Image (tube, grey):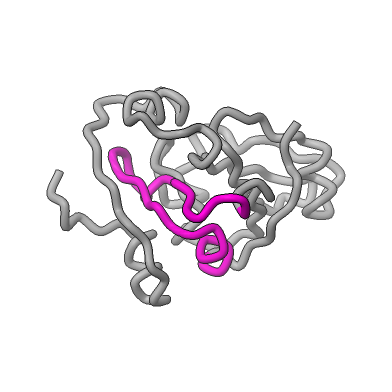
């Protein structure tokens, strides 16, 4: 992969003049964020995954949380004003977000969905999120991520 490869997420950050550091790595197959963090020697606490869910209202919501944590479905539903949420099926991820599994990031999706970032992100100077395709990451300030996705910080994990 060439270092100058720009993803939709990176182009959006550039457009908004939000500073970030791209990071590229070899990735033959995506297992999960924990596997990638282990492979790259990165801390779990500041490495964040992106989950996409659909509420009873049929609206989509995006949740960004530490890779080793599990979302608390009741807390997440309450935060976005839904009675219940369910994960978007892997086969539908690309149609909903524009990204493939393992490359999903809250930045630069096809549409801007309400986004909630776990409040622990605020304890770090920078966090790591997917860069918008396999083999790419974006390192940026939590507040900059929140600004880029028009998100909010809340407690959404078990």
> Magenta residues, as a range?
122-148
**Going by the image, does 101 lie left or right of 77?**
left
Query: Can you give x and y, in whole percent of width and height, for residue 59 in the image?
Result: 70, 54
Residue reaching furthest to the left: 2
**100 relative position to 152: left or right:** left
Depth check: 98 or 117 in front? 117
Determine if the magenta segment contains residue 124: yes
85 in magenta: no
Q: Residue at x 63, y 30 (%)?
A: 69
Quadrant in the rendering for residue 112:
bottom right
Which percent across, then down, holds residue 8?
A: 35, 60
**Vertical position of residue 91 compared to residue 156: above or below:** above
Does 29 sit above or below residue 124?
above
Question: Disc count in the image?
Answer: 0
Above or below: residue 81 compared with residue 37: below
Quadrant where the N terminus sits is top left
As drawn, 27 above or below 120: above
Q: Classify residue 43 as left or right of residue 6.
A: right
In the rendered image, residue 9, in percent from the top left (x then y), is placed at 38, 59
Quarter placement of the C terminus: top right
Q: Residue at x 46, y 26 (%)?
A: 34
Please tell me in which quadrant of the rendered image residue 6 appears. bottom left
- The percent position of residue 117, horizontal first and vertical second, equals 63, 51
Q: Residue at x 69, y 35 (%)?
A: 71
Q: Which residue is drawn at the image coordinates 43% and 36% (left, top)?
A: 101
């Amino acid at each position: 992969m060439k270092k100058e490869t720009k993803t939709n997420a990176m182009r959006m950050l550039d457009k908004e003049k939000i500073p970030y550091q791209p990071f590229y790595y070899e990735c033959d197959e995506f297992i999960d964020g924990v596997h990638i963090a282990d492979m790259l020697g990165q801390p779990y606490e500041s490495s964040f995954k992106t989950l996409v869910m659909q509420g009873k209202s049929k609206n989509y919501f995006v949740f960004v949380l530490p890779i080793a944590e599990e979302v608390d479905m009741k807390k997440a539903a309450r935060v976005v004003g839904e009675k219940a949420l369910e994960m978007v099926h892997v086969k539908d991820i690309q149609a909903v977000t524009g990204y493939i599994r393992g490359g999903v990031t809250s930045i630069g999706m096809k549409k801007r969905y309400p986004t909630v970032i776990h409040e622990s992100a605020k304890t770090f100077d920078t966090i790591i999120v997917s860069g918008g395709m396999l083999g790419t990451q974006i390192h940026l300030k939590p507040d900059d991520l929140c600004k880029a996705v028009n998100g909010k910080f809340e407690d959404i994990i078990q």
